[in-house]
Image (tube, rainbow, N blue to C red):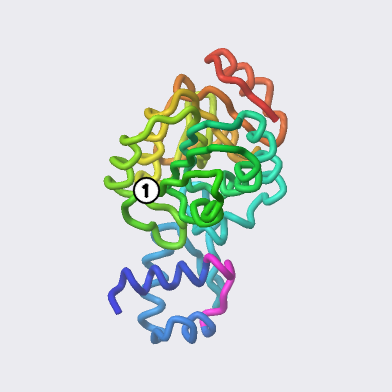
């Protein structure tokens, strides 16, 4: 097995368990102790895991894009609330571009109540949940399936988005502050940047943990966002700074 395959396997295991004993990780990966140690050093240097007293722990860091199974369980009630608020902006007979974020995936029950929707997404989980609904015409991007994320990325996915025009783009992010919106992945950022260009209006979904937080890749400025939907009232400073840039905040 090549190193990249071994590293992907380790991260798949860690995304489900978060903390694993070295001995258990050896058994699950079928690696020798020496090979596993070298692979873990690589992941630790990338700030994805830490090793402590015979245990390996998944890092909770704002510069690491975790897999879908980790993200879907984080701030669950907050994300469901955000989806319910976002629903107020969605009507019948609309075309929606929706990203692969876990927050956006909770829109499915609200979308299913609408008539004659077109949904364009790079999210495998959302597309599958909408499959079979006769009231929704679903288009899913072509491209590379990003490991463990349920997200389709790459230049093919970006070019796919160019073929559509939507009423609303609904996206999430890794962080947002008074200066703009940020992502942890350049691949995700490239696809979402194209989504913004293809829509008349953009809604940013972000729970309170992402406000006043920055990351590696700046997706856009506030001039490209129309509405921010969150779950708690942000600071007065943040509200003032984004409202001055004509962004509506809803919570």
Left or right: where 179 falls relative to 206: left
The span picked out in magenta is 15-22
Say which residue appears at 54% left-offset and 51% top-offset. 130
Occupied quadrant, residue 177:
top right
In this rendering, the count of numbered labels is 1
Label 1 secondary element: loop
Occupied quadrant, residue 200:
top left
User: Within 10 Å of the Cα at label 1, are there few (<14), some (14-19), or many (20+) other Cα atoms?
Assistant: many
Magenta stretch holds residue 19: yes
**227, above or below 112, in the image:** above
Say which residue appears at 44% left-offset and 30% top-offset. 166
**161, above or below 51, in the image:** above
Q: Quadrant of the N terminus?
A: bottom left
Residue identified by numbered label 1? 141
- In percent of width and height, residue 39 lies at 37, 72
- In percent of width and height, residue 74 lies at 63, 53
Say which residue appears at 47% left-offset and 69% top-offset. 12
Occupied quadrant, residue 193:
top left
- In percent of width and height, residue 201 lies at 49, 24
**66, above or below 139, in the image:** below
Left or right: where 95 falls relative to 41: right
Say which residue appears at 53% left-offset and 44% top-offset. 136
Q: Nearer the viewer, residue 136 or 207?
A: 136
Left or right: where 205 falls relative to 149: right
């Amino acid at each position: 097995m090549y190193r990249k395959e071994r590293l992907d396997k380790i991260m798949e295991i860690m995304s489900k368990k978060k903390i694993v004993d070295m001995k258990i990780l050896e058994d699950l990966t079928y690696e020798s102790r020496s090979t596993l140690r070298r692979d873990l050093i690589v992941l630790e240097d990338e700030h994805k895991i830490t090793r402590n007293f015979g245990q390996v722990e998944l890092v909770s860091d704002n510069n690491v894009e975790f897999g879908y199974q980790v993200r879907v369980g984080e701030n669950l009630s907050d994300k469901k609330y955000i989806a319910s608020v976002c629903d107020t902006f969605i009507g019948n007979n609309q075309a929606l571009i929706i990203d692969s974020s876990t927050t956006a995936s909770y829109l499915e029950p609200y979308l299913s109540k609408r008539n004659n929707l077109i949904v364009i997404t790079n999210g495998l989980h959302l597309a599958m949940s909408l499959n079979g609904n006769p009231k929704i015409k679903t288009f899913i991007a072509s491209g590379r399936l990003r490991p463990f994320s349920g997200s389709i990325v790459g230049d093919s996915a970006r070019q796919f988005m160019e073929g559509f025009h939507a009423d609303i783009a609904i996206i999430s992010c890794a962080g947002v502050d008074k200066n703009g919106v940020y992502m942890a992945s350049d691949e995700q950022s490239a696809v979402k940047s194209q989504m913004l260009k293809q829509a008349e209006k953009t809604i940013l979904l972000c729970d309170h943990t992402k406000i006043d937080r920055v990351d590696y890749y700046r997706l856009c400025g506030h001039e490209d966002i129309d509405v921010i939907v969150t779950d708690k009232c942000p600071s007065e400073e943040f509200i003032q700074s984004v409202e001055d840039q004509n962004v509506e905040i809803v919570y």
